Image (spheres, grey):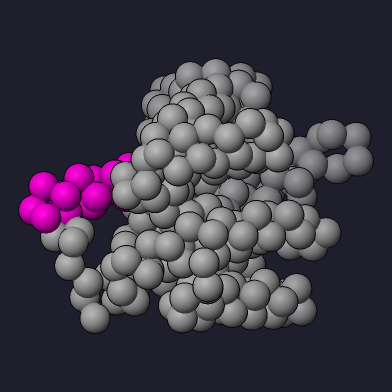
Amino acid sequence: MRMTETVKQLLIINIIFFIGSQFVSVAYPLFSLYYPENANFRIWQPITHMFMHAPMPNLMHIVFNMFALVSFGSALEHFWGAKKFLFFYISCGLGAALLHTGVNYLQIHSLLNEVSSLNLSNAQIHTLLNADYRAIFDENGKMLAGNIKTILDNSHCTQEQFNKISEAAMISQTPVVGASGAIYGLLTAFAFMFPMAELAIIFIPIPIKAKYFVPGLLAVDLFLGFKGSSLFGSGGTGVAHFAHVGGALCGFLMMWYWKKNQFNKNRWD
């Protein structure tokens, strides 16, 4: 199917963001999505993060996302029209950001609850969550004198409690980038509209009907998300699995509502 106009524009914007961010050092801290309590968080990041992708040499991140955008997005825009498609795409990206941030909130505050006996103030917690833990130790692994050491010493923080705090800080300071959440929304919509279409991935070159392929893909993301979560297990993959689930969930709810109201049969333009 020919690439549709809105998909083409989204493709161009993503490529521009990707190339530009390789040369402008402030792009990633400015446009990636940070946890709202992080000092790098900006109000526009829930939107801009979906146009950012992993930096070079990780080229596959943007390649796979853009391939999926063109493959599934063009089919959906063809039936929906540009405005409805763009509304759906952005909404799924925001849904991905919302669930990802919500899971981070649960993880961070679960860890902080485990060190509540330290009686840290909100200002102290903010300082600890935003500290650069790579720069507070000398070459011998001894903590350097400074604000962080003072806070921890005065609260009589143990090594186990410090590990909890540093884990919470790592979650808070890890940004998320990529169109994957919006793409998972497109995959869900595609499965809704074309359930019998056969899909395949490189690792499983056997065609699978969309109505089985997409739920199976989400099941893998859920498993890996729970496995890598500090609430449920260990072994993170470096992938924002709950953002994928959030985009798919948003897409499912919108498709369910549109189908229920027969709205999905009408183009917006």
Q: Does the magenta run of residues contain 110?
A: no
Q: Does the magenta run of residues contain 252?
A: yes
Report whether 23 appears left or right of 87: right
Residue 235 lies in what quarter of the image? top right
Tell me which residue sits at (76%, 59%) in the image: 59
Name the outermost residue toward the right: 139
Using the image, determine if residue 14 lies above or below residue 157: below
Please state the horizontal and vertical placement of residue 67, each as a whole percent of the image: 62, 60
Please state the horizontal and vertical placement of residue 70, each as a whole percent of the image: 54, 65
> Where, quadrant-wise, is the C terminus in this rendering?
bottom left
Report whether 26 appears left or right of 197: right
Tell me which residue sits at (64%, 80%) in the image: 16
Tell me which residue sits at (68%, 34%) in the image: 205
Name the outermost residue toward the left: 261
Q: Nearer the viewer, residue 21 or 92?
A: 92
Q: Nearer the viewer, residue 164 or 265?
A: 265
Q: From which residue to which does the magenta span run?
A: 249-262
Report whether 196 appears left or right of 67: left
